[in-house]
Every structure is written in structure tokens, then in C-alpha cells.
Image (cartoon, rainbow, N blue to C red):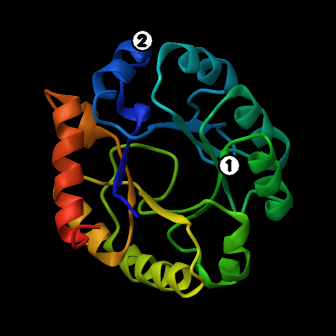
Amino acid sequence: MAIQISPSILSADFAHLADEAAAVSPSADWLHVDVMDGHFVPNLTLGLPVVESLLKATDTPLDCHLMIEDPDRWAPAYAEAGAGSVTVHARAASAPVRTLREIRRLGARAGLALNPAEPVEPYADIVGEMDMLLLMTVEPGFGGQSFLDVVLPKIRRAREILDTREASVWLQVDGGVSAETIERAAEAGADVFVAGSAVYGAQDPAKAVESLRALAVEAAGGR
């Protein structure tokens, strides 16, 4: 699968989101939108109205990551609004399979997210219900954290599970992705990378995206 980069607007200037989206549009595959409710995670960011506005301001598909309580109730609305991908956290969903199916029915790619301490093996039997598996490489809730190398073995296990099942499921990592860490994650098997400050903290965000992609492609052996 091709390497993909999803810049996170959590590190962007919220007062100028349309401009920040445009700054990465020449090179980004996705625009990652962290939706936090202040309950599932301690931080509070943005919600559906901002996503709806952002969809009108950019042609880059939105990769909505819902760090919220009761995603079974709220996730379908993001897919219905036009998000290209909607990811819910396994530990927050009461009926993850049903929710993943509903996201797909509404036309979006469906993702399932696991926190650093959550094992991937319990979800091996439902990989066919998802389009993407997101492994958090920091504790969710805040941007700017350091990449947790303890997650690397889990990335490798997830890659083995996906390959064994011949599932065309993307393996995304989110948290602390930078020029110093992306190669380790790519070598372990990730193919979709969420990068916040490494992109929006750069002088040229679009060029930063391409630099990260080049590092990941080389580390992944050209895939």
C-alpha cells in the first residue's frame, strides 16, 4: 500500500483553518481532524459544525478521528456530512462492528483506534469490518507529545495480522510522528502517518509533508 501523510489540524492555527488546509493541500493525502469532547479525553477541540465548514473550504479529504464518548451515536453524522474517513475508539464504542458498518454505509472509510496499552489481538477477527486500524503512539488528548517506542512491537503485530488475513486495511499511527520517528514506524509496518507539529511547525508545511513521505517510503522499502 502507498505511504500516506495526514497532517493534523490540531497543530494548525484554528483562527485560519481554511488557510492552514490550503497550506498542505498540494502534498497531503488527507487532513486529519481530531474531535475531542473533554470526556473521553481531557481536551476539548472542535465538532461537527467546524468539520462541515472545513469541508466547504478544502478539497483535501477529511480524516476525522473521534476521541469522544458514545461514538456509536455521533460517528455516522461525520460520514453523512462528507468526511472521507471516520475513526472511532474501540474502548468508547458499545457496538463497534455496527458503527463501522454504518460509517461505511454512509460512504466514508471506517477506522478503529486503539490506545497505546490496548492490545491489537482482540480485534483480529473484525479487521474485515474496517478500512483502517489506527494505533495511537501517544496517549490521546493533546498534541506535541513524544512518540512512544513501546508501541513499535504492536505495529509489527498489527501488520502481521493484516497481512495474514490479506486485508486491504490501512495501518495508521498518530502521535509524535516527525522526521526523527517516522522511519521507525514505517519499518514496523505503518503506512498512514498523522503528523501535527512536524508539519504545521515547519516553515513550509507542504514541503514538510513531502519530506516525511520520502523518509517513510525509504524505510518501508519503497512500498
CA gap, disc 1 and disc 2: 25 Å
Q: Which mark is residue 40?
A: 1
The foreground one among 41 and 16 is 16
Q: Quadrant of residue 169?
A: bottom right
Amino acid under disc 1: Phe
- Residue 85, image x, y percentages: 60, 44
Residue 72 falls left or right of residue 174: right
Q: Is residue 94 above or below residue 119?
A: above
Instruction: Name the residue rendered at 71%, 34% in the picture.
Output: 78
Question: How many marks are shown on the rendered structure?
Answer: 2
Q: Is residue 205 above or below residue 110?
A: above
Amino acid under disc 2: Ala
- Residue 144, image x, y percentages: 33, 45
Instruction: Point out the image quarter for the C terminus.
Output: bottom left
Would residue 70 be seen by someone viewing this image from the given angle?
no
- Residue 117, image x, y percentages: 54, 74
Q: Is residue 84 above or below residue 136?
A: above
Q: Secondary structure at mark 1?
A: loop
